[in-house]
Amino acid sequence: MTSMGVKMRDGSIGTGEQAARLRQRRIRRLFAALAAAGFVTGLVMALLEDDAKGPVAGVGALPPAFAIGAVVLGIVAILWGGLRYWQSTDELDRRDNMLASMIGLNMYALTYPAWWTLWKGALVPAPNGETIFMATMIVTAISYGWLKYRN
């Protein structure tokens, strides 16, 4: 029963439990690296940002080379991190991720058209991309947490 995570009589851990711990360690390191990259990028962005520039408040506030570099870094980090995460997870985590992603995408697919239509009817302000993006990410994260820890 070592693959079930039960300690053996000599106190050692079975190979299944060892593999699970190594997988979790790789996932934690991956998230730490991605979080560090995001933190450093955000910190540098905050230091470089000049709100006085640009014809509209906040537009043109970053040096163009930094903006391009940050976008390229973000795209590479998300694609590379997503691939590494997918390779490090088991079928149960993948199922939870796919279901949570579907819930988040459905939330987006319902929210944006509804907001846009109500805006066209002069009932609400114009759709705010940042608000919808953050709501989508929050709903997806909550869905994943609920799916993973619902027991």
Image (cartoon, rainbow, N blue to C red):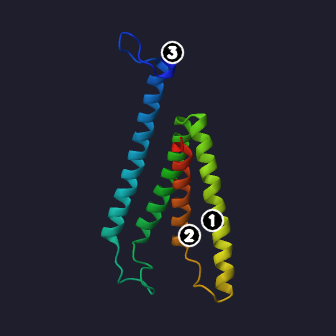
The residue most toward the bottom is 122
Determine whether the residue tagged by mark 3 lies in a helix, strand or loop. Answer: loop
Between 133 and 65, the one nearer to me in the picture: 133
The residue most toward the front is 151
Q: Is residue 36 left or right of residue 105?
A: left
The answer to the question of whether label 1 and label 3 lie on touching residues, with beta carbons closer than 8 A, is: no
Distance of label 1 from label 3 (alpha carbons): 45 Å
Which of the marked residues, 1 or 2, is nearer the chain's N terminus? 1
Task: Indicate the position of residue 48 as horizontal and vertical percent values.
Answer: 33, 70
Snapshot quadrant of residue 92: top right
Q: Residues within 10 Å of mark 2 (few under 14, many from 20)?
A: some
Question: Label 2 is placed on what type of residue?
Answer: Ile
Determine whether the residue tagged by mark 1 lies in a helix, strand or loop. Answer: helix
Determine whether the residue tagged by mark 2 lies in a helix, strand or loop. Answer: helix
Question: Label 1 is placed on what type of residue?
Answer: Tyr
- Checking the image for residue 108, the label placed there is 1
User: What residue is shown with label 3?
Assistant: 1
Task: Indicate the position of residue 114 as horizontal and vertical percent values.
Answer: 67, 75
User: What residue is shown with label 2?
Assistant: 132
Which of the marked residues, 2 or 3, is nearer the chain's N terminus? 3
Give above or below for 119 relative to 77.
Answer: below
Task: Indicate the position of residue 37 as horizontal and vertical percent values.
Answer: 39, 53
Looking at the image, is mark 2 or mark 3 nearer the viewer? 3
